[in-house]
Image: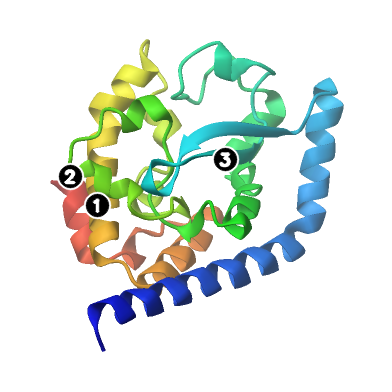
Amino acid sequence: MSRNRTLDLNEFLKRSTDLVFSLVALMCLSPIIAVIALAIFLSDFHSPIFAGERVGMDGRLFKMLKFRSMQMGSDKNGPSSTSVNDPRITRIGSLIRRTKLDEIPQLWNVIRGEMSMVGPRPQVRWAVDLYTPEELQLVSVRPGLTDYASLMFREEGQILAESTDPDGDYLRLIAPMKNRLGLHYVKTSNVFTDLRIMVATCIAVMGLNPIRLLPQSVRDIYIE
């Protein structure tokens, strides 16, 4: 089998997996989606959905959906990186961010083909503009709902908790390692890798430690 046919098969399997998992997840989570959306709306009578511009595959911009966890207009008033004690976060927002429920609407991005279930997390334009030539490989694939970096940096907000410069500290303390983990995913990913990451993500959402489910090569990158 030629390399191009192998790539086409992998892409077909990945896209099929994305569609099946995202559609099933949306159907199963529909009661939770309705409750969260209603709770956010009733808290301030504004839209429960936030659509933030992110850089997708091949540098294309798209609107990434999230349940709104901050006050209206917060994206225009303050840094892109967020600590756990950011005053812009609402009471409901704090809960859904802690449990990662704010990410559920991105299942719609997956269905639309803008995102994948697994892949490097999408970044804002200014962060991508700072990528090295090697790091630009991160936008050669669809961004994902979850990846190695999402699991290894589950407490990102805690890391930035005492920061007076969240964006600067994110670039110095978190971004380099996240990008290394993302590049490792891009270079080694396959359908079985994706399934492994999705299982680990489910474990993490339940409040358990998923690290042991990840390959040793990923853990080695993190502790270097």
Residue in the picture at 85% in, 38% down: 38
Q: What residue type is labelled 2?
A: Glu
Query: Do tag 1 and tag 3 residues touch (Cβ < 8 Å)?
Result: no
Marks 2 and 1, Cα distance to the nearest angstrom? 8 Å
Q: Is mark 3 on a helix, strand or loop?
A: strand
Between the residue at mark 3 and the residue at mark 2, the CA separation in whole angstroms equals 24 Å
Query: Residue, x 77% and y 42% (percent of image)?
Result: 36
Disc assigned to residue 92:
none
Q: Residue at x 39, y 79 (%)?
A: 9
Task: Locate residue 37, reporting x and y percent.
Answer: 79, 40
Q: Which residue carries the number 2 mark?
A: 134
Q: Between 110 and 209, which is closer to the camera in this rendering? A: 110
| Residue type of the residue flagged with mark 3 | Met
- Residue 104 position (above or below residue 158): below
The residue wearing badge 1 is 183
Q: Is mark 2 on a helix, strand or loop?
A: loop
Left of 107 or right of it: where is 119? left
Query: Which circle's residue, 2 or 1, is located before the other in the chain?
Result: 2
| Picture coordinates of residue 97, whole percent (x, y) | 58, 37
Q: Residue 64 got which mark?
A: 3
- Proximity of marks 2 and 1: CB atoms separated by less than 8 Å: yes
Image-quadrant location for residue 159: top left
Near mark 1 (Cα within 10 A), the count class, few <14, some 14-19 or many ≥20, is many
